[in-house]
């Protein structure tokens, strides 16, 4: 059985105190210009714990595992109150960027986190919180990804990017690249997802359409990057993505009046939950949380390879779990083959006492209606899938009466106001 999520704890404790032991490559001032050591960021594979120096690649060269940024928590200083609107500056100590001047904030973050007591009572739980990421500039939590990743890529000297997405990441990156000089972006998308792209034409952005679904578009895009010497953005395995998505949870942990017992999020690759878990471990080690919550990953039943494998207690995705040409209401999470990422999500859920669930179409539609009519938020079907998971769990008796539940509503549908011109088509 794969077990590596727990390595975060050992790695965090291993790095703690590095600033004072001569291993940080430190100078006389830190990146905030304050007296003391330079900011310590060390990079490890979370599977085999091999250490890398400022890796400009996404996977461990020893075992193919995910690389992550580990900070010296003795250096971390997060003000009790925000000094301004920029969450990148506020949480700088826990981001994979060495200099504050490297940060490129795109106006995202500071999203609402609120309770709905009457709905909690109806579900038979103590408290129910929602984090509404739909109010971000492109109506998606992926705006956080774009800002953190471009900030990190700038420091690494990466300028030419290639990525694949079902629409949210592409749109967020396109917006960010149009605002930040010096980057070029090649976006690969499956033909059925073209309508989900929502950005204006720009001279530094090229849209590539692939005859196939999301996974196929990703494979074509990765080959294109290799053939042209460009940087393959990497999706789940891009540590900047996970660290960007972590910020939504750090905000929520700071804003909630009670610590969450359960966290629900809809998943395709699951990178957001890995960021949420890592952030919870960091906060627990800092004394800002008393415990790590149980993480509940939710998929739509029509495309739920992770949920099916988890129900079988399988530690890997098998061919029988893969969904070819996936269909479903929640386009943003239509990933039929999560072979590379499932072990991380399975381990995360098991380690934290959570589960991977699946919700049917009727439940998802009902969840969306409740969110609109009772909660007063208009979100997409992927966000509704997360809340549908809460409904499933409550009905199955998985949530204790004293439970505090946090639901991450990751985005909303965007109006098709801007549709980029297709630059190239790939068979």
Image: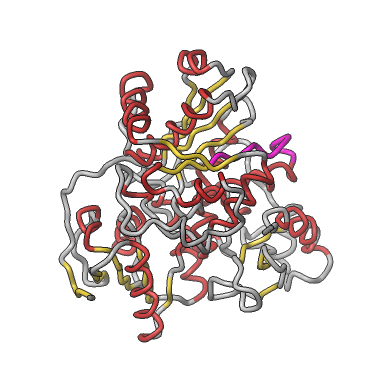
- Taking depth in this image into account, of 254 and 162 the one nearest to the observer is 162
Report whether 187 appears left or right of 200.
Answer: right
Report whether 86 appears left or right of 196.
Answer: right
Question: Residue 80, position in %: x, y?
Answer: 63, 36
Q: Is 293 a magenta residue?
A: yes
Question: Residue 127, position in %: x, y?
Answer: 56, 20
- Is residue 251 placed above or below 58 in the rendered structure? above
Magenta part, dominant SS: loop
- Taking depth in this image into account, of 143 and 65 the one nearest to the observer is 65
Identify the residue at horizontal 57%, vertical 59% (top origin): 316
Question: Residue 105, position in %: x, y?
Answer: 42, 54
- Is residue 148 placed above or below 313 in the rendered structure? below
Q: Is 289 a magenta residue?
A: yes
Give the quarter of the image for residue 42: bottom right
Q: Is residue 51 visible?
A: yes
Report whether 144 appears left or right of 175.
Answer: right
State the extent of the magenta-drawn residues as a range: 287-296
User: In the picture, which quadrant includes the N terminus?
Assistant: bottom right
- Is residue 197 placed above or below 217 in the rendered structure? above
Identify the residue at horizontal 64%, vertical 51% (top origin): 347
Identify the residue at horizontal 44%, vertical 48% (top origin): 304
Q: How many numbered marks, from 0 up?
A: 0
Identify the residue at horizontal 44%, vertical 31% (top origin): 387
């Amino acid at each position: 059985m794969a077990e590596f999520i727990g390595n975060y704890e050992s790695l965090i404790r291993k790095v703690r105190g590095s600033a004072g032991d001569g291993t940080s490559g430190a100078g006389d001032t830190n990146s905030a210009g304050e007296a003391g050591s330079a900011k310590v960021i060390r990079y490890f594979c979370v599977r085999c714990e091999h250490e890398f120096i400022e890796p400009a690649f996404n996977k461990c060269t020893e075992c193919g595992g995910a690389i992550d940024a580990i900070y010296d928590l003795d250096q971390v200083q997060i003000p009790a109150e925000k000094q301004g609107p920029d969450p990148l500056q506020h949480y700088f100590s826990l981001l994979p960027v060495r200099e504050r001047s490297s940060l490129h904030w795109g106006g995202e973050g500071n999203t609402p986190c609120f309770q709905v007591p009457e709905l909690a009572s109806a579900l038979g739980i103590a408290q129910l919180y929602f984090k509404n990421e739909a109010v971000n500039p492109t109506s998606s939590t992926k705006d956080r990804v774009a800002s953190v990743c471009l900030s990190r890529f700038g420091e690494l000297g990466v300028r030419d990017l290639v990525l694949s997405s079902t629409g949210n990441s592409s749109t967020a990156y396109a917006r960010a690249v149009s605002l930040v000089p010096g980057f070029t972006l090649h976006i690969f998308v499956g033909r059925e997802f073209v309508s989900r792209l929502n950005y204006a034409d720009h001279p530094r952005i090229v849209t590539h359409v692939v005859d196939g679904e999301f996974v196929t578009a990703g494979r074509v895009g990765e080959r294109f990057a290799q053939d042209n010497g460009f940087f393959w953005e990497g999706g789940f395995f891009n540590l900047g993505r996970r660290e960007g998505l972590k910020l939504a949870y750090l905000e929520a942990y700071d804003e909630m009046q009670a610590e969450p017992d359960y966290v629900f999020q809809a998943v395709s690759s699951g990178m957001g939950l890995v960021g949420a878990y890592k952030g919870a471990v960091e906060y627990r080690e800092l004394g800002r949380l008393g415990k790590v919550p149980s993480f509940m990953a939710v998929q739509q039943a029509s495309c739920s390879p992770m949920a099916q494998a988890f129900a079988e207690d399988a530690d890997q995705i098998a061919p029988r779990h893969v969904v070819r040409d996936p269909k479903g209401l929640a386009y943003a999470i239509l990933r039929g083959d999560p072979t590379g990422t499932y072990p991380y999500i399975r381990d995360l859920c098991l380690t934290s006492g959570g589960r991977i669930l699946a919700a049917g179409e009727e439940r998802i539609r009902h969840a969306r209606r409740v969110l609109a009519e009772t909660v007063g938020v208009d979100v997409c079907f992927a966000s509704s899938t997360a809340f549908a998971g809460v409904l499933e769990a409550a009905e199955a008796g998985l949530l204790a009466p004293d439970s505090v539940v946090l639901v991450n509503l990751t985005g909303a549908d965007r109006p098709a106001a801007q549709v980029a011109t297709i630059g190239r088509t790939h068979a």
